[in-house]
Image (cartoon, grey):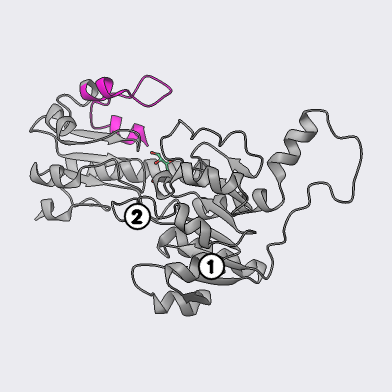
C-alpha cells in the first residue's frame, strides 16, 4: 500500500523499527502535505504547526484517535482520519483469547512447564473456570464490543452491556440486555471493556468498581489502558477482589504499574489486539487511501473532523 503512495508522491518512511520520539516526530512532519501517524504519536498544536500551513491531512494508522488534538487540527483546516471497521473481528477475537487464557490459566501453566517444574499430572493442577453459560458483560457496544458480544453466542452465554444509549436493534440481534454500570459490575462473571478513551471514560474502573465485582470475575481490557486505574487493579488482583485479568493495554505503555508483573492471575500482552497480517494490511490500505483521497481533493472515507471538508 505504501507503493500506491510512492507511485504518485514522494514518501518518507520512519527508518526505525520503533515509534518516533517527540523530537523526531516534530522533525519528521516538517513541510509534509500529509502524515500517517501511530497511536504513539501525540499530534497536538505544536506538531500541527511544525508540519506547516500546507499540511492537509494526518491519517492515524489506528481506529482510536486519543493521540489527536482534533480541535487544533480543525482550527488549522487539517483533515484527521482513522481506520474504523477493519480491526473489529481481530480485536474482539483477541479479547476472547485473553479471556480463554485467564480462565484456563494458560500463561501461568506454560511458565510452569517452561521452568521445568512439571513432574506429572495432578487432579487439581491449574484448575480454572468454565466460560460456557456464564454472564459476560460488555462495556461499550460499539463496533468492537458488538463483535465481541456476537462471539459469546458460541458459548451460550448471557450477554449484558452498558453504553451511552441502549441499542435496541443490536440487542435483538445479539440477545444482549442493556443494564446500568453498577449492574454490569455486580452481575458479570467476565467483563470486557470496549470503550474509547475520553475524559469521561478515564478510570472507568477503579477501587470502588472492583469492590462491586464478583470475587470470581475476570476483567479483559483490549481497548485503552487508562480506562482502568492500574494501581487499583494491582491491589484488586493481589487481594483477590477479582479472580483475574487479561490485559492488552496499559495506563502508561510500555511501563507497567509496580507489582503487576509479579501477579500470576493476570495475562499481559503488549498492545497486539489488531496485530494480524490481514488486519494490519487493511488498516494500512485505509490510511493510504485517506491520504491519496485528500491529496487528490476528494472526500476521505474516514474523516474524524468532517467540518473541515465543507
Ligand atoms: C493499533 C489500536 O495497534 O487501532 C487502534 O486504536 O489501538 C491498535 O489497532 C495501534 O493503534 C497502532 O497505531
Q: Would residue 225 appear left or right of 37 to someone viewing this image?
A: right
The disc, 2 or 1, on the residue closer to the chain's N-terminal end is 1
Residue 247 visible? The answer is no
How many numbered markers are drawn? 2
Pointer 1 residue Cβ closer than 8 Å to ligand 1: no
Q: Report the front residue among 212 and 192.
A: 212
**Residue at coordinates 34% horizontally, 68% vertically from top-left?**
164
Any mark on residue 186, and which? 1
Residue 302 sits above or below residue 179 on the image? above
In the figure, is residue 51 to the left or right of 271?
Answer: left
- Circles 2 and 1 in contact, beta carbons < 8 Å: no
Kindly tell me whether residue 214 is visible in this rendering: yes
The spot of residue 3 in percent (x, y) is 35, 32
Residue 127 relative to residue 159: left or right = right
Q: Which residues are magenta?
A: 1-26
What type of secondary structure mainly makes up the magenta span?
loop
Q: Could you tell me residue 263's position as x and y percent? A: 63, 38
Picture quadrant where residue 208 is located: bottom left
Mark 2 to mark 1 CA distance (whole Å): 19 Å
Q: State the residue at coordinates (10%, 44%).
A: 77
Residue at point 50%, 62% (across, down): 147
Residue identified by numbered label 2: 201
Q: Residues within 10 Å of mark 2 (few under 14, many from 20)?
A: some
Ligand 1's quadrant is: top left
**Height in image: 139 above or below 123?**
below
Whole-percent x and y of residue 244? Answer: 62, 50
- In the depicted view, which residue is nearer to us: 71 or 306? 71
State which quarter of the image contains the N terminus.
top left
Pinpoint residue 310: horizontal percent, then vertical percent. 8, 56
Q: Which mark is residue 102?
A: none
Amino acid at each position: 500500500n505504501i507503493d500506491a503512495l510512492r507511485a504518485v508522491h514522494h514518501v518518507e518512511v520512519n527508518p526505525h523499527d520503533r515509534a518516533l520520539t517527540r523530537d523526531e516526530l516534530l522533525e519528521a512532519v516538517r513541510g509534509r502535505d500529509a502524515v500517517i501517524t501511530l497511536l504513539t504519536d501525540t499530534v497536538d498544536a505544536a506538531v500541527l504547526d511544525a508540519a506547516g500551513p500546507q499540511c492537509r491531512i494526518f491519517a492515524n494508522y489506528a481506529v482510536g484517535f486519543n493521540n489527536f488534538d482534533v480541535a487544533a487540527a480543525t482550527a488549522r483546516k487539517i483533515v484527521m482520519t482513522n481506520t474504523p471497521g477493519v480491526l473489529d473481528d481481530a480485536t474482539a477475537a483477541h479479547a476472547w483469547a485473553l479471556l480463554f487464557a485467564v480462565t484456563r490459566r494458560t500463561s501461568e501453566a506454560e511458565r510452569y512447564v517452561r521452568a521445568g517444574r512439571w513432574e506429572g499430572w495432578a487432579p487439581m493442577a491449574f484448575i480454572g473456570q468454565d466460560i460456557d453459560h456464564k454472564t459476560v458483560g460488555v462495556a461499550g457496544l460499539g463496533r468492537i464490543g458488538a463483535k465481541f458480544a456476537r462471539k459469546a453466542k458460541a458459548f451460550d452465554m448471557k450477554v449484558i452491556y452498558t453504553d451511552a444509549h441502549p441499542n435496541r436493534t443490536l440487542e435483538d440481534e445479539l440477545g444482549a440486555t442493556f443494564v446500568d454500570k453498577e449492574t454490569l459490575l455486580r452481575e458479570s462473571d467476565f467483563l470486557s471493556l470496549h470503550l474509547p478513551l475520553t475524559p469521561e471514560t478515564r478510570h472507568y474502573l477503579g477501587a470502588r468498581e472492583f469492590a462491586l465485582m464478583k470475587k470470581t470475575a475476570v476483567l479483559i481490557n483490549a481497548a485503552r489502558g487508562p480506562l482502568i486505574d492500574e494501581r487499583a487493579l494491582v491491589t484488586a488482583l493481589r487481594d483477590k477482589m477479582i479472580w483475574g485479568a487479561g490485559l492488552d493495554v496499559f495506563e502508561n505503555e510500555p511501563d507497567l504499574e509496580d507489582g503487576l508483573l509479579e501477579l500470576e492471575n493476570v495475562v499481559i500482552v503488549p498492545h497486539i489486539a489488531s496485530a494480524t497480517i490481514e488486519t494490519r494490511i487493511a488498516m494500512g490500505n485505509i490510511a493510504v487511501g485517506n491520504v491519496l483521497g485528500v491529496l487528490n481533493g476528494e472526500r476521505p472515507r474516514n474523516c474524524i473532523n468532517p467540518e473541515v471538508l465543507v
